């Protein structure tokens, strides 16, 4: 029995708080239906005087939303798929196979988590643009025009391994009984077969958590994509394209269009999150676990 | 256990095969860049031709610590003010919210609402808050005007700009803190509350004698991880102010590093900044590891 005093006060507090959390989203949604005159009025109003749906069509045209959307989907889906593969392979190797050196590798992976991402922006930018033998580069990484940044891979490769993902998969695989694997080995199943047909299906809950976590993170990722965009404009993802092209539009027309674009870029991920939040929450909890 | 050396060798081979993507990745995107960047911090370089890298020893670091350097103040000061400010806002609100929603119906629903900003791209968050802060027709000034206060140019005024961004950063951080704190609260056994109620303890006594002490590991975890996040965060400043303006009033370490490298082409200076900022983050990380090794956060 929990103390249940002041339920009215509690509800009032939590509702006021919720309004403050949700309000900016409503602002974004309603402003996306405002015409230029409506938007530039001298006083505040949440609702548009007249709902102007044309912003969405114009945004698709002027902001190239189709291209941005496609890039975001490719980037997020590919990153997620690759991270699932690299994490589960590594997680399996670190728990279910016995060999010298695995402890050292795991310690190293844990240690990498202490190095924040901003530390790698500058060198990784150079490495991607001057990747040897890619995009016309020679073995020294020179002579090309953009290197890896000529391809979508530039948005994916630097995120293709996740220390958090390996950690998560390792934790989960530790709970799988070794007897399954021994039995399969006695039955003569190959090691690869054991991994793909026996172990992977057992880890679906962990994979789901990792997938939703990675997908949302990748969809929202901004800085790295922005850097690659400065090399190759074709690589613009939704956040980058909206932020960049915002400045190219007519200032008086811009904001409602940008809002429409933001709604289009935000809505899918909010829906994905709301549907699959159970898995996401589980992932967040795991970031708090230590060895 | 089958101890045959053939199986062992097979396992070792497979193990390294399975780990090979990870090892190659950490070589290309972790080890090499880390060393490269450390080396760059002792050089002057524009970021194009490797043969033009010029070794300058400690010059970049000395310049950052020089008396007229803007990096220590205001930039690094701003970084810490931003980090502590956002942590304070998000933590205090998250503690109150999580304490309340664990006692209400539809807990999951409330939690979802508070979590929405966390899964939204910073570009959307930053831009929407720009509208809310708008001096002519933004919501916040409309409310202030109703209360008889003159409009404030939140982001154009150096005295209010950083605070305005801290509010947004705090708002953003509430969700994940709520998540961890509610989990911590739910891990406290019901029996404790029952016993305390039977003993006639009041709400305040229960909160200070049972809830807070048992929630301590979660609280520490939230505070430290948010602080680490806050020290590195700069995309919000980038989206809302572009270059940390007006003046340097909203400039933070990560943003200055980013601009030094990619706007001004001072890769050496930028790398030195990255390592100084990293040392700040690293100190907090060490504190975190020590605290958790001693106290343990296994409670949730």
Image (tube, rainbow, N blue to C red):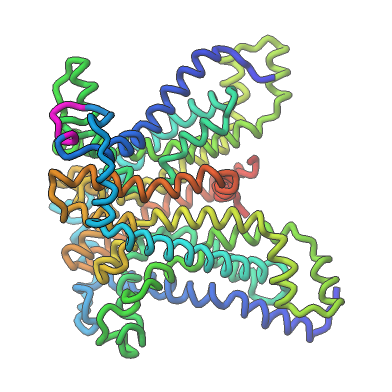
Give the side of residue B286 with respect to residue A52, left or right: right
Quadrant in which the N terminus of chain A appears: top right
Query: Which residue sits at x=54%, y=67%?
Result: A108
Q: Is residue A43 magenta?
A: yes
Please give the count of numbered marks on the rendered protein.
0
Bounds of the magenta segment: A38-44
Q: What x and y, as percent, mark residue B295? A: 60, 42
Q: Nearer the viewer, residue A17 or B272?
A: A17
Magenta region, mostly helix, strand or loop?
loop
Query: Which residue sits at x=13%, y=52%?
Result: B68
Q: Nearer the viewer, residue B159 or B147?
A: B147
Q: What x and y, as percent, mark residue B260? A: 20, 61
In the displayed structure, A132 sits above or below B229; it is: below
Give the side of residue B46 with respect to residue B123, left or right: left
Query: Which residue sits at x=63%, y=32%?
Result: B186
**Residue A178 in which image quadrant:** bottom right
In the displayed structure, A119 sits above or below B175; it is: below
């Amino acid at each position: 029995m929990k103390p249940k005093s002041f339920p009215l006060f509690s509800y009032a507090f939590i509702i006021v708080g919720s309004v403050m959390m949700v309000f900016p989203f409503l602002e974004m949604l309603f402003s996306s239906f405002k015409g230029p005159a409506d938007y530039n009025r001298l006083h505040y109003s949440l609702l548009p005087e007249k709902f102007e749906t044309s912003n969405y069509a114009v945004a698709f045209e002027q902001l190239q939303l189709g291209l941005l959307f496609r890039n975001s989907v490719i980037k997020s889906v590919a990153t997620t798929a690759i991270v699932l593969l690299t994490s589960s392979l590594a997680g399996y190797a670190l728990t279910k196979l016995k060999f010298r050196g695995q402890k050292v590798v795991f310690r190293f992976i844990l240690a990498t988590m202490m190095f924040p991402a901003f530390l790698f922006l500058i060198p990784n930018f150079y490495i991607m643009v001057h990747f040897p033998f890619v995009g016309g580069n020679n073995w020294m990484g020179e002579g090309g025009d953009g290197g890896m940044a000529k391809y979508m891979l530039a948005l994916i490769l630097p995120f293709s391994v996740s220390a958090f993902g390996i950690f998560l998969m390792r934790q989960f695989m530790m709970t799988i009984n070794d007897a399954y694997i021994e039995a399969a080995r006695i039955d003569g199943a190959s090691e690869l077969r054991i991994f793909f047909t026996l172990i992977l299906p057992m880890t679906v809950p962990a994979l789901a958590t990792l997938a939703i976590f990675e997908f949302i993170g990748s969809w929202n990722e901004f800085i790295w994509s922005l850097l690659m965009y400065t090399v190759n404009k074709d690589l613009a993802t939704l956040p980058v394209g909206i932020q960049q092209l915002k400045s190219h539009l007519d200032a008086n027309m811009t904001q409602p269009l940008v809002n429409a674009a933001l709604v289009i870029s935000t809505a899918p991920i909010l829906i994905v999150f709301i549907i699959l939040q159970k898995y996401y929450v589980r992932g967040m909890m795991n970031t708090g676990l230590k060895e | 256990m089958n101890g045959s050396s053939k199986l062992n060798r097979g396992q070792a081979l497979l193990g390294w095969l399975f780990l090979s993507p990870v090892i190659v990745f950490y070589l290309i995107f972790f080890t090499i860049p880390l060393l490269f960047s450390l080396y760059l911090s002792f050089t002057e370089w524009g970021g194009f031709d490797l043969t033009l890298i010029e070794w300058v020893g400690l010059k970049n670091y000395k310049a950052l610590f020089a008396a007229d350097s803007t990096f220590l103040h205001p930039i690094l000061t701003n970084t810490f003010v931003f980090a502590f400010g956002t942590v304070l806002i998000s933590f205090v609100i998250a503690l109150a919210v999580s304490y309340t929603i664990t006692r209400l119906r539809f807990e999951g629903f409330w939690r979802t609402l508070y979590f929405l900003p966390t899964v939204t791209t910073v570009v959307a968050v930053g831009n929407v808050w720009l509208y809310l802060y708008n001096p002519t027709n933004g919501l916040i000034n409309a409310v202030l005007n109703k209360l008889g206060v003159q409009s404030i140019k939140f982001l154009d005024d150096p005295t209010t700009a950083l605070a305005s961004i801290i509010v947004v950063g705090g708002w953003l951080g509430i969700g994940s803190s709520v998540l961890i704190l509610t989990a911590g609260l739910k891990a406290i056994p019901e029996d404790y509350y029952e016993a305390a109620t039977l003993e006639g303890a009041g709400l305040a006594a229960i909160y200070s004698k049972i809830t807070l002490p048992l929630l301590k590991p979660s609280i520490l975890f939230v505070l430290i991880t948010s602080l680490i996040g806050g020290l590195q965060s700069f995309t919000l400043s980038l989206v809302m102010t572009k270059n940390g303006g007006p003046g340097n009033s909203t400039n933070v370490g990560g943003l200055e590093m980013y601009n030094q490298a990619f706007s001004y082409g001072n890769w050496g200076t930028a790398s030195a900044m990255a390592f100084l900022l990293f040392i700040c983050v690293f100190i907090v990380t060490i504190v975190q590891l020590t605290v958790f090794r001693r106290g343990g956060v296994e409670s949730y």
